[in-house]
Image (tube, rainbow, N blue to C red):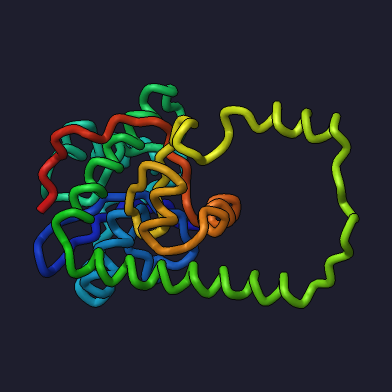
Amino acid sequence: MFYVVYKTTNLINGKIYIGAHQTNDLDDGYLGSGYLMRYAINKYGPESFQKEILHLLDCKSEMYNKERELVTEEFVKLKTNYNVRVGGKGGWTDEQQQENKRRSLIKLKQLWETDVEWATKQRERFSSQLREQYKTKQRVNTTTPHIPGEYKHTDDAKKSISEGRQGKGIGNTNRAEPIIDDGGMIHNSIVECARYYGVRPESIVRRIKKGLYQKIGRLNVQETYFPVN
């Protein structure tokens, strides 16, 4: 097993990504992870990136310690890299985890707002996927027989369900929780995301449950972003 700290360089714009990787094959083609790297690889193609090994370490802890030395708070703020959080794994406080999320969202928000052509293609692709999922569900529902009068809740059950749902809905009277889709785009709520892609909110909820979209908490992303272009 190899424990590697590597650097991946975008040959088009010179931006870099420094990361840690555990592998049995030093030539496994791994370029990096995270939303910004996925964004860049999707946009420019893997052939536009060059990877070099900076350090070969003896164990996982040494690997993450070295990554932590290189990917500092000051480093991730630079416009010359794709890193969105400090290096190392684990040991973060709740405040640091929130800061990692906030920093990631700020960079992603700028990318979506500045690269209009790519964002449009991603929106069309995601919308198509969600519409197909919705059509599939509709076909299943129309072929499933419904027996009138079955599955009725008692009044007590309805009251219990109602009380349990208070504050958890997706209407305008409930607090919206921002989410980030699998292309890195930020939406202020499930309803807003559904409207953006032209699908029902239930489709977005299903993708969240599957881990395709992520809830990101009520973080403040209405700030000046770090420059990343």
69 sits left or right of 172 in the view: left
User: Which residue is pictured at 34% across the width and 54% down the height?
Assistant: 184
- Residue 227 placement (x, y as % from top left): 10, 44
Could one spot residue 122 in this view of the protein? yes
Number of numbered tags placed on the structure image:
0
Q: What residue appears at the point 57 percent right and 55 percent down from the top-left corner?
A: 202
Q: Where is residue 218 in the image (x, y as percent from the top left)?
A: 39, 30
**Residue 211 visible in the shown view:** no
Q: Determine the residue positioned at 13% across, 35% down.
A: 224
Image position, residue 83 (x, y; %): 25, 46
Q: In which quarter of the image is residue 38?
A: bottom left
Give me the residue at 46% from left, 54% from top. Answer: 22
Q: From this view, report whether residue 169 is shown above or below residue 193.
A: above
Q: Which residue is most to the front?
A: 148
Q: In this view, does 115 lie to the left or right of 29?
A: left
In depth, the one of 203 and 220 nearer the eye is 203
Residue 115, horizontal then vertical, whole percent = 16, 61
Nearer-the-camera pick, 121 or 62: 121
Q: In this view, does 74 lie above or below 106?
A: above
Q: In the picture shown, does residue 121 fall above or below 69?
A: below
Decide if residue 222 is on the left or right side of residue 168. Answer: left
